[in-house]
């Protein structure tokens, strides 16, 4: 049988139940820290916050890949630093080799251009007499030096007043012409020869003209005169004037030149070959060991760093194409003691100079590569910081939509508790009013 409540009791009971329900809801928000715990509480805020939190979670998941990408680039950069130090060591090895004079440079001393009789007549040394002799004269007969005349070496320059040089060393050829006047001497010829850069020339104490190569390859040396530059150059190619300066015409011809290497090797340079080749090998080894997590940018691998959660054309990423860094690709060839194609002959000054230029070029290439990786590293680090900040912004935005204001909720709960106590007191008073009926019996 249903119990009938008075109107006062029923109203107070309803108010108490409502207050209790509100207090429970506030207690739940305080316990979870959220004012929107489900779609029922606020559908718009709930689903918006869920979307923001989902994207934040996806971006946070990308941070591991970005971090690995950064470490991969840094590993390659460290590898470049190491290779650079090895190249610097190779440069030091080359300098040590260059500091020791080559022993195998092709050298030839011509026949003497001065005699003891001229020494007695002029009171000069054989060397000075030879240097002061004129190149040309009125006929092809050599005139001896006297107290009043410097003499000449016996080249008729009455009509042929242009001299020329033809010098060939390996695949390099130097040809040049110059004017011959009445005052042109052997000293001037020596200066012209030294301009070639392929050989050096000097007159020794015996009065002999010496021609010495700067490398170890055979030197083809020719001197000639003519009415013009073209004729003089043709004469030089055949060595028509060589006899006058103490050399043979055959010295100008490939295959017959007598200006050849002595074949003697420098022990110091030979000992540096192994050191050079070992350093060269270490470059390859170091580059191979510069990978991270299975990707080696110095081994030609490709690195892709994804920056957002999207796919297809909307995906943003950084592609870093590595390079195959080897000593060969840097232009650093193996060293040896002989003249072989594709190697550096440590006994040859020209080869050492070429190796120096190659090492300088290798350092330039390494600096360029390091700059490229540095730029990519800067981009990756910037995107890493941005991704962290963006994930934080998304999380904060989601929290702003769902989180409860603890202070406000606590104040509301306190007010409800006070209201609950008042409702309980009112309910008690209503019951007392109903109990007044019992006094009639």
Image (cartoon, rainbow, N blue to C red):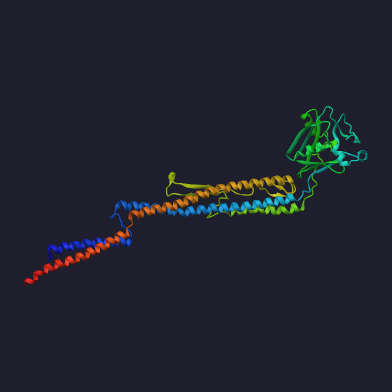
Q: Is residue 21 above or below residue 322?
A: below
For residue 227, side relative to residue 362 (left or right):
right
Q: Position of residue 218 (x, y in %)?
A: 78, 42
**In-front residue for pair 191/62:** 191
Q: Quadrant of the N terminus?
A: bottom left
Residue 319 appears in the picture as rendered? yes
- At x 12%, y 67%, the residue is 433
- At x 11%, y 69%, the residue is 435
Q: Position of residue 441 (x, y in %)?
A: 6, 72
For residue 144, side relative to residue 394 (left or right):
right
Q: Give the farthest residue toward the left.
A: 441
Q: Position of residue 130 (x, y in %)?
A: 86, 39
Q: Quadrant of residue 213 in the image?
A: top right
**In-front residue for pair 206/439:** 439
**In-front residue for pair 81/269:** 81
Q: Is residue 351 above or below residue 150?
A: below
How many numbered circles are shown?
Answer: 0
- At x 22%, y 62%, the residue is 19
């Amino acid at each position: 049988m249903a119990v009938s409540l008075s109107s006062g009791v029923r109203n107070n009971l309803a108010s108490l139940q409502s207050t209790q329900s509100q207090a429970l809801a506030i207690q739940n928000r305080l316990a979870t820290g959220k004012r929107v715990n489900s779609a029922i509480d606020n559908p718009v805020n709930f689903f918006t916050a869920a979307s923001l939190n989902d994207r934040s979670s996806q971006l946070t998941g990308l941070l591991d890949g970005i971090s690995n990408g950064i470490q991969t680039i840094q590993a390659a950069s460290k590898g470049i630093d190491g290779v650079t130090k090895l190249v610097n060591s190779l440069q030091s090895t080359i300098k040590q080799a260059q500091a020791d004079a080559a022993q195998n440079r092709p050298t030839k001393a011509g026949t003497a251009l001065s005699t003891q009789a001229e020494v007695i007549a002029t009171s000069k040394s054989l060397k000075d007499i030879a240097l002061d002799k004129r190149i040309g004269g009125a006929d092809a007969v050599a005139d001896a030096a006297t107290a009043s005349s410097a003499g000449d070496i016996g080249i008729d320059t009455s009509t042929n007043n242009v001299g020329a040089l033809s010098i060939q060393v390996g695949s390099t050829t130097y040809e040049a012409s110059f004017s011959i006047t009445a005052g042109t001497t052997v000293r001037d010829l020596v200066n012209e020869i030294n301009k070639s850069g392929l050989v050096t020339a000097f007159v020794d104490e015996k009065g002999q003209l010496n021609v010495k190569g700067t490398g170890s390859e055979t030197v083809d040396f020719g001197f000639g005169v003519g009415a013009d530059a073209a004729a003089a150059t043709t004469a030089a190619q055949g060595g028509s004037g060589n006899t006058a300066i103490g050399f043979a015409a055959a010295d100008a011809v490939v295959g017959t030149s007598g200006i050849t290497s002595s074949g003697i090797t420098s022990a110091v340079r030979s000992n540096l070959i192994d050191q050079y080749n070992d350093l060269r090998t270490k470059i390859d080894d170091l580059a191979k060991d510069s990978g991270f997590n299975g990707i080696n940018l110095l081994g030609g691998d490709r690195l892709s760093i994804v920056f957002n959660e999207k796919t297809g054309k909307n995906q943003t990423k950084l592609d870093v194409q590595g390079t195959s860094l080897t000593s060969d690709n840097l232009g650093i060839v193996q060293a040896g003691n002989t003249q072989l194609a594709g190697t550096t002959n440590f006994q040859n000054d020209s080869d050492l100079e070429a190796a120096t230029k190659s090492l300088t070029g290798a350092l330039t290439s390494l600096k360029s590569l390091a700059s490229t990786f540095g730029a990519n590293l800067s981009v990756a680090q910037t995107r890493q910081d941005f991704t962290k900040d963006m994930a934080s912004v998304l999380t904060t935005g989601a929290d702003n939509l769902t989180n409860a204001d603890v202070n406000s909720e606590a104040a509301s709960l306190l007010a409800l508790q006070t209201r609950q106590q008042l409702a309980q007191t009112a309910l008690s008073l209503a019951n007392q009013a109903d109990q007044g009926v019992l006094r009639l019996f």
